[in-house]
Amino acid sequence: MNLISARKLIFEYVRRDKNGDVDGFSRAIDEVDLEISRGDFVAILGPNGSGKSTLAKHLNSLLFPTEGTVFVDGWDTTDAEKIWDIRKSVGMVFQNPENQMIGTIVEEDVAFGPENMGIEPENIKERVKESLTMVEMYDHRKTSPSKLSGGQKQRVAIAGVLAMHPKCIVLDEPTAMLDPVGREEVIRAIRGLNDVENITIILITHNMEEAVFADKIYVMNEGHIVMSGTPKEVFSRVDELRENRLNVPEVTLLAHELAKAGLNIPPGILTRKELCNCLCRS
Amino acid sequence: MIREITLGQYYPADSVLHRLDPRVKLFGTLLYVISLFLFQSFTGYIVATVFLASLIAISHVPVKFMFRGLKAIFILLIFTAVLNMFLTPGRELVSFWKITITIEGLRFAAFMILRLTYLITGSSIMTLTTTPSNLTDGLEKSMRWMNILKVPVHEIAMMMSIALTFIPVLLEETDRIIKAQQARGADFESGNLIHRIRALVPILVPLFVSAFRRANDLALAMESRCYRGGEGRTKMRPLRYERRDIIAYLVLALYIACIITVGILF
Amino acid sequence: MSILVNHLDHIYNPGTVFEVKALSDVSFSVDEGEYIGLVGHTGSGKSTLAAHLNGLMKPTGGGIYYNGVDIASEGYNLKELRGHIGLVFQYPEHQLFEEDVFTDVCFGPKNLGLSRTEVEMRAYDALKAVGIDDDHFYVSPFDLSGGEKRRVAIAGVLAMKPEVLILDEPCAGLDPAGRDEILAVADELHDSLGITIILISHSMDDLARHVKRILVMNDGKLVMDGTAREVFSHREELEAMGLAVPEVTAVLADLKKAGIPVRDDLITVEEAAKEILRVFGR
């Protein structure tokens, strides 16, 4: 059975006019089906306002479907009795690292989750150490988060989720507010968790370069899933992505232009190396 | 300028004071503050000064930090002193126009300045050597008996801890907003009072919007990390009294004994 | 119009243990109609430099001359300067505060003490220049989409009719289409209105496509100043500073290394595609 499966998921919210009266309903998510298996690295791409963050919040019972169902590890996310199990299984990392820090010291922040779960002090210490080591932040355990760079803060946030021993981590645009160095750090940490610890990753982003590493990409727009497939498949459909306010990585774009001009280059080139090898052979 | 407010700021260092149980420090600060109002003689202040000075010495916090907190209340300090100086009846020292300075007033003003200075410095020592979360832990644990009175102790402690974490973040944000509005030609320094108050709107609205956005984000982050109130929560480092805490209590008792002796003798 | 930055220094907390040299001996000049990119990793001093150009910070050494006059001199009208050199902060939409879009944009010109008609005309022009339609003028700025908010905020500075516009990461957090829209606005302001643009950005690909000249900051020093092509020819030095060259420039360099005789000083996808096709005889 899949770790996460959403069936015909619909989410509507109330729209209000200036006087606060109900004006109608807006559909943020419209009949979305999603299947994510254990150990997968899934990227959900979509422009601003496409509903991808709303979708993410359904995966750990922060929001509940208006219609349809979401199952996490076999549990219905609307099952009030399982809500804490679900939140334990699916950890969330948000966009703004500043707004998710609860402790005044790195290790206190990481301990917050396990403390809420009622874990024994000795065990918490172990978990904190292990999680901070995984994201290479153990040396900073006594530092105040305000002294850290954006990339470091975001890695602490990831450690905070890891300490809850989740099966899956959902990252909602974790790099949107970071500089390229911070981005690189976070993406490296995420890939490490997926490769080494085999933790399921759901990365929500509109940075195309980050989605290249995924096993599977879903593209959302206006509440629908409009495209899905491997990065190769998705990024070979350059024009379709553009229609959805997205783009492709620069290398893919260059390869696309070259292929259009008649060079023998297969669609969906994702990295510099691929393009180079391809050109050197021809 | 805003960043200079240090009250409630933690100074990371490794000292005995830093390692003390927050409950000891809370109780100690309380006793110390009360003691400041117990004596009426300068001799009492000698004891308090020795006590305060030794605390500063073992805290490993630069002295400069201790007194930074005073800057914020400087005006208040002067104001209280002046009021006391002029309004206390007693033997006349100097008199001009309708104002009379009395010897008692002068004495009282000096006491007031000393008391407030010692009070702020003393509480600064506590906040500078205790992380906000440790402090709230201490509060939560020592106030637990109030649960019987249906006081939501855990919630209050959590609120305090969040407020303390977000103060620096919001101060920085305020700084940024002020600069950004200045770049749009906003003027916060000239004009009459009403003008100046109105000039605050472009700062306050964005600040509130941002605070609400942050609060919303934080609530989501806490919920998704399984936060559901204080019940069933454990601690990574539960508060437990150690030998040094017992010793600290003894030192406190000694201090109080000194103060009382001084109070009786002088 | 001319800006001359002459041996500019800025030291935070001078004489204390917290002393930080944010800017050190920075000298350059900006002429009318230039389109400049300003890059550097986080903390390299680029935002501090921008604040100085706008008179928000005072130099601790050296000076800035606008049209030949030292802006730090006694009695210099900084408010007027801010009308001439506009600065748009990161996430400028966070500074919106008025009840409707139009009133918010009026805030800047009103502060300049202009007549009401002039203020409104400028606000109108500015909103038009960033592509906001009339039917959006009287809605609350908080009801707009992310990209629209950003454009309204830019209009708020634009309405002061600056001769120079400094944009501090105007694309941060926007989706690819939103980024393109903002950069198109910047191009338009430069090309049609003749505004001198200084664009602070982390995206080398964006800079390669839009700016003519690039200033590179590192540790508070100005380390490179030249045309985009010149600057991007220093790949190793840039990488040592935690920066990169545009993806396509890197592709060309890889190809050259692999023995394909391509020029490696090209910086946009179009140029690179043309060059590769030339070599492959298409």
Image (tube, coloured by chain):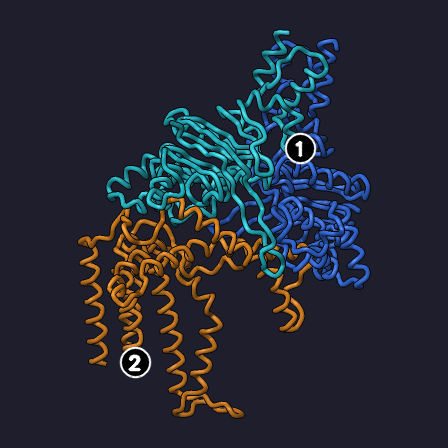
Chain colours: A cyan, B orange, C blue
Q: Image quadrant for the C terminus of chain C?
A: top right
Which image quadrant is residue A242 in? top right
Res B96 visible:
yes
For badge 1, the amino acid type reads Asp
Q: From the top left corner, tell me how far across and down residue C82 is, in percent.
A: 71, 54
Would residue A232 appear left or right of A134 to someone viewing this image? right
Q: Above or below — where is B12 with respect to A200?
A: below
**Number of marks in the rendered image:** 2
Q: Which residue is the site of mark 1? A: C206
Res C243 visible:
no
Few, some or many residues within 10 Å of mark 2 (<14, 14–19, 20+): few
Q: Residue at x 62, y 45 (%)?
A: C146
Which residue is nearer to you in this view: A141 or A115?
Answer: A115
For badge 2, the amino acid type reads Gln
Would residue A60 appear left or right of C153 to someone viewing this image? left
Regarding mark 2 in the picture, which secondary structure is present there? loop
**Farthest residue toward the top?**
A282
Which image quadrant is residue A239 in? top right
For residue C281, the mark is none
Which image quadrant is residue B9 in? bottom left
Q: From the top left corner, tell me how far across and down residue B234 is, in percent.
A: 27, 48
Given the image, what chain letter belongs to the residue carrying mark 1?
C
Nearer the viewer's eye, disc 2 or disc 1?
1
Q: From the top left corner, tell me how far across and down residue C194 is, in percent.
A: 81, 42
Is the Cβ of the residue at disc 2 closer than 8 Å to that at disc 1?
Answer: no
Q: Which residue is drawn at 44% across and 48% down?
A: B220
Q: From the top left corner, tell me how far across and down residue C133 is, in percent.
A: 75, 48
Q: Which residue is drawn at 62% across and 56% down?
A: A17
Q: Which residue is the site of mark 2? A: B40
Would residue B247 appear left or right of C32 to someone viewing this image? left
Q: Above or below — where is C173 with respect to B43?
A: above
Distance from label 2 to label 1 (Cα)? 71 Å
